[in-house]
Image (spheres, rainbow, N blue to C red):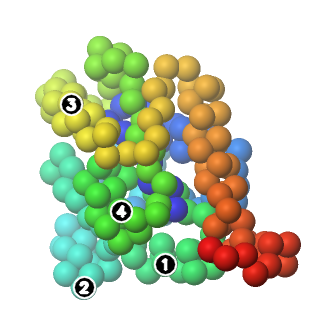
């Protein structure tokens, strides 16, 4: 399992999309959210869009591996889907925030964690304004939240600074590839080649 976190506007979603195009074996976890869809987003592709009452009912039933409230909207990761994928031997990618990452690490301490940074807060503001999807008030809130997000970078194993997008994609792919090559994972995936090794 790979957890990928970043402040809003750092390019996390674009990096995830590029990684999935390069590595179709990765399974992306699609979160549930109470946030309304942005133009071009589709239910079940970017998110599972649900109303607040449904989200709270799922949370009360323990259906989320992790959940958080961000910018007034709720987000949560389906516990059943994650466990189903892992039990089937699939590699899972979670696009998540630092709060969710803390919760998941408690349950899966051997997961791989990656934090994406923008080149600077000035660059981050330019990206948020350039998206044209949020009001200036929302952008100001996102920048304030970004400072808080970035303060948690020390909780992550890997850090990618998204200066050059193509380099950042290569770095992210290299992390995933390296994790697959760890001895413990190779033994599990290839018992016929690496039998009876003492782990």
Q: Is there CB contact under 8 Å for labels 3 and 1? A: no
Q: Which residue is mark 2?
A: 61
Viewer-nearest of labels 4 and 1? 4
Secondary element at image label 2: loop
Residue 162 in the image, given as x and y percentages of width and height: 48, 26
Secondary element at image label 3: helix
The residue shown at (20%, 67%) is 52
Q: Is there CB contact under 8 Å for labels 2 and 4? A: no
Viewer-nearest of labels 3 and 2? 3
Q: Is residue 169 above or below residue 90?
A: above
Q: Gap in Å between the C-alphas at discs 2 and 4? A: 21 Å
Q: Residues within 10 Å of mark 3 (few under 14, many from 20)?
A: few
Q: Gap in Å between the C-alphas at discs 4 and 3? A: 22 Å
Q: Gap in Å between the C-alphas at discs 4 and 1? A: 14 Å
User: Is residue 21 left or right of 4 when viewed as pictured?
Assistant: right
Q: Gap in Å between the C-alphas at discs 1 and 2? A: 16 Å
Residue 168 in the image, given as x and y percentages of width and height: 56, 30
Q: Which residue is mark 1?
A: 83
Q: Residues within 10 Å of mark 2 (few under 14, many from 20)?
A: few
Which numbered disc, 1 or 2, marks the residue that appears first in the sequence? Answer: 2
Which numbered disc, 4 or 3, marks the residue that appears first in the sequence? Answer: 4
Q: Which mark is residue 147?
A: 3
Q: Which mark is residue 105?
A: 4
């Amino acid at each position: 399992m790979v957890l990928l976190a970043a402040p809003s506007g750092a390019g996390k979603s674009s990096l995830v999309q590029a990684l999935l195009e390069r590595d179709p074996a990765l399974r992306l976890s699609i979160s549930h959210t109470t946030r309304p869809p942005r133009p071009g987003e589709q239910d079940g592709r970017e998110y599972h869009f649900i109303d607040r009452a449904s989200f709270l009912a799922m949370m009360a039933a323990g259906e989320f591996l992790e959940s958080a409230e961000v910018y007034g909207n709720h987000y949560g990761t389906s516990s059943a889907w994650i466990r189903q994928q892992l039990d089937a031997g699939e590699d899972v990618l979670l696009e998540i925030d630092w709060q969710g990452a803390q919760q998941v690490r408690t349950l899966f301490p051997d997961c791989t964690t990656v934090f994406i940074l923008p080149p600077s807060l000035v660059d981050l503001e330019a990206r948020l304004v350039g998206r044209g999807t949020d009001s200036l008030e929302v952008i100001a809130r996102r920048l304030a939240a970004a400072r808080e997000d970035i303060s948690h970078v020390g909780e992550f194993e890997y850090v990618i600074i998204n200066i050059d997008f193509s380099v950042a994609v290569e770095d992210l792919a290299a992390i995933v590839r390296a994790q697959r090559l760890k001895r413990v994972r190779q033994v599990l995936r290839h018992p016929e080649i690496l039998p009876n090794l003492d782990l």
